[in-house]
Each structure stands twice: as C-alpha cells, then as structure tokens.
C-alpha cells in the first residue's frame, strides 16, 4: 500500500512520461532484452532495433498499461485483472522476469530524469511497480 506521498511521487514522474509511452516503452524493452537476453525468448517476433515499429507498438501498449495502473493505484487488482489473466494463463510469463523489467524501468527513468529522479522517487516507483508485478503474477496458482 502506497502512502499519499508515495502516490504523489509516482504521479509526478508519470506526468513526465505521459505522451512519450512508445519511446520510453521501446527503450525499456531494448534494455530488458539486451541486459537480460533470456527475456527475449517471450518476444521472438520483435527485433532489436529501437525504431522498429513492433518494438514501439509493444512498448507503447506496455507503458499505457502502466499509465492505467497509475490512474488506479487504489484498485490495481481490478484495473489490471484482464492483463493478469493474459500474463499468467495465456502467455505464462515466468514471474522471475518481472523484477528484471522493474530494474530496467528504473534505469530508463533515471537516465531520462536524472536529478529529478530522486531517491524518494525511486523508492516510490519501486514499490508501485512491485505492486503491479504482484497483481500480474498472482493468478498462476
Ligand atoms: C503483452 C503489459 C510484464 C511479456 C502485454 C500487453 C500489455 C502488457 C499491455 C499487451 C496486451 C494485449 O495486447 O492485449 C505489461 C506490464 C508489465 C508486463 C504492465 C509489467 C509491469 C511483462 C514481462 C514479460 C511480458 C516481465 C516477459 C518478460 C509479454 C508478452 C506479451 C505481453 C510476451 C505478448 C506480446 C505480443 O503478443 O506481441 N504486456 N507486461 N510482459 N507481455 Fe507484458
């Protein structure tokens, strides 16, 4: 559960990302596939070039879902329920991949926002993204 202050920090950073979902998302995927090549096995249809349309398209979808989560921080489980079904029951993405994505997400934020991505911002985003990952991986049983 995020405190009011943590929610405000998440929303503040999201305001800087909103409108740039495709480019942030593509960069996130590129980092994920490069730093943790095993993650690429889920995305055989995507390439490694950051301009590639499919990378941008998937990056945009993924970040738009994060945007939905930001709008529904009080009710993540309901807001992300269809996406949780997809990842757990259809895609069967191993839950161990989520911390890798969270780590890359924070590096993307830090490299773009630099000084604005303070220690407190990182702590709030880590908690928020972990909450998203918990919801997306809890339907496996
Ligand atoms: C599909 C979001 C984590 C693998 C998707 C879609 C969204 C999404 C919105 C598209 C759903 C649709 O087309 O209806 C997220 C979010 C994540 C996350 C918000 C975590 C914060 C992961 C991780 C992996 C993964 C860690 C594996 C390393 C996939 C795959 C697809 C997918 C393989 C299908 C791609 C396709 O059909 O082209 N995800 N995802 N996701 N996700 Fe995730």
Image: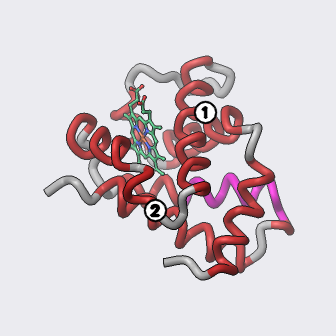
Which of the pair 28/141 is nearer the observer?
141
Question: Which residue is disc 2 drawn over?
Answer: 75
Marks 2 and 1, the one that precedes in the sequence: 1
x, y (%) of residue 123?
62, 76
Which of the pair 75/105 is nearer the observer?
75
Q: Secondary structure at mark 2?
A: loop
Answer left or right for 139 relative to 18. Answer: left
Image disc number at residue 60: 1
Task: Name the residue rendered at 76%, 55% in the picture.
Answer: 111
**Residue farthest left in this picture:** 141
Start-end of magenta stretch: 103-114
Distance, label 2 to label 1, CA atoms, is 22 Å
* Magenta segment includes 34: no
Instruction: Report ligand 1 position as a quadrant.
Output: top left
Image disc number at residue 25: none
Dominant secondary structure (helix, strand or loop) of the stretch shown in magenta: helix
């Amino acid at each position: 559960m995020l405190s009011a202050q943590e929610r405000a920090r998440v929303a503040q950073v999201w305001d800087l990302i909103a409108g740039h979902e495709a480019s942030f998302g593509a960069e996130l995927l590129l980092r994920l596939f490069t730093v943790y090549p095993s993650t690429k096995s889920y995305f055989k249809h995507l390439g490694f070039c950051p301009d590639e349309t499919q990378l941008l398209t998937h990056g945009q979808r993924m970040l738009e879902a994060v945007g939905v989560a930001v709008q529904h921080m009080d009710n993540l489980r309901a807001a992300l329920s269809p996406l949780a079904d997809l990842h757990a029951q259809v895609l069967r993405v191993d839950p161990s991949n989520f911390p890798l994505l969270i780590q890359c997400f924070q590096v993307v934020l830090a490299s773009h926002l630099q000084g604005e991505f303070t220690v407190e911002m990182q702590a709030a985003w880590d908690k928020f993204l972990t909450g998203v990952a918990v919801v997306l991986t809890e339907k496996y049983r």
